[in-house]
Image (cartoon, rainbow, N blue to C red):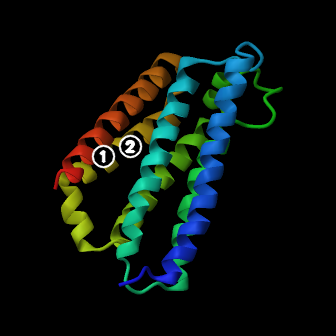
């Protein structure tokens, strides 16, 4: 049985958007390596950049599950594209074009945290819809850990919006990065072994 041509089309569009997301993150990291003092790198910002890179790469991998969708509609197509675009927006929010009024990436994140953490909450909620598109078997495969993951990311997003203090923000960034690494390693090795 061949691959659905609609899915192949969707996969190409999805790859373009997620490729731009990864490009944004890698280009930003390269600029920090080239000129670390120019835009004031920080551990808070760097943790979120690495978190986003791991998340986008993992999300791209899990989108292979869309091949299981039997009947594509324009609405499903639009949902997947909007979801991917939200990931791109989250990545762009980590590397704005102009930092002059903020002075550094960290100051930008602290002052504009509502936008970043709001987008983080949105992609977390959209992931529920993306998982639903893949069918009931996907929910069963992911199990309770997936719902715990969703709750943790929403709590991190809520605390990120509410708290401006640098130590709290650093703690959230470190917690999110450690949790995301652990979650995807456990899920990948558990599901890959099934």
Measure how far apart labels 2 and 1 are at the Cα level. 6 Å
At 43% from the left and 62% from the top, the residue drawn is 63
Residue 180 at x, y = what percent? 36, 37
Q: Is residue 78 visible?
A: no
Give the vertical position of 149 relative to 169 (above or below): below
Give the vertical position of 96 relative to 37 (above or below): below
Indicate the quadrant where residue 95 lies.
top right
Contact (Cβ within 8 Å) of mark 2 with mark 1: yes
**According to the image, label 1 marks what residue?**
149
**According to the image, label 2 marks what residue?**
153
Q: Which secondary structure lies at badge 1?
A: helix
Indicate the quadrant where residue 99 lies.
top right
At 66% from the left and 51% from the top, the residue drawn is 20
Q: Is residue 117 left or right of residue 146?
A: right
Residue 8 at x, y = what percent? 52, 75
> In this view of the protein, which residue sits in the foreground, 184 or 162?
184
């Amino acid at each position: 049985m061949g691959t659905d041509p609609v899915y192949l089309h969707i996969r190409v569009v999805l790859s373009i958007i997620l490729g731009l997301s990864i490009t944004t993150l890698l280009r930003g990291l390269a600029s920090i390596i080239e000129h670390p003092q120019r835009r004031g790198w920080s551990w808070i910002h760097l943790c979120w950049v690495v978190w986003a890179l791991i998340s986008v790469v993992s999300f791209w991998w899990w989108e292979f599950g869309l091949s299981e969708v039997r009947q594509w509609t324009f609405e499903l197509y639009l949902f997947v594209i909007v979801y991917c675009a939200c990931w791109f927006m989250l990545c762009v929010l980590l590397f704005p074009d102009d930092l002059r009024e903020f002075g550094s990436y960290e100051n930008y994140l602290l002052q504009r945290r509502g936008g970043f953490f709001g987008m983080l909450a949105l992609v977390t909620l959209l992931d529920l819809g993306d998982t639903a598109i893949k069918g009931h078997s996907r929910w069963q495969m992911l199990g309770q850990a997936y719902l715990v993951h969703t709750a943790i990311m929403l709590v991190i997003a809520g605390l990120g919006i509410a708290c401006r203090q640098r130590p709290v923000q650093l703690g959230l960034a470190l917690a999110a990065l450690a949790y995301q690494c652990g979650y995807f390693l456990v899920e990948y090795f558990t599901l890959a072994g099934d």
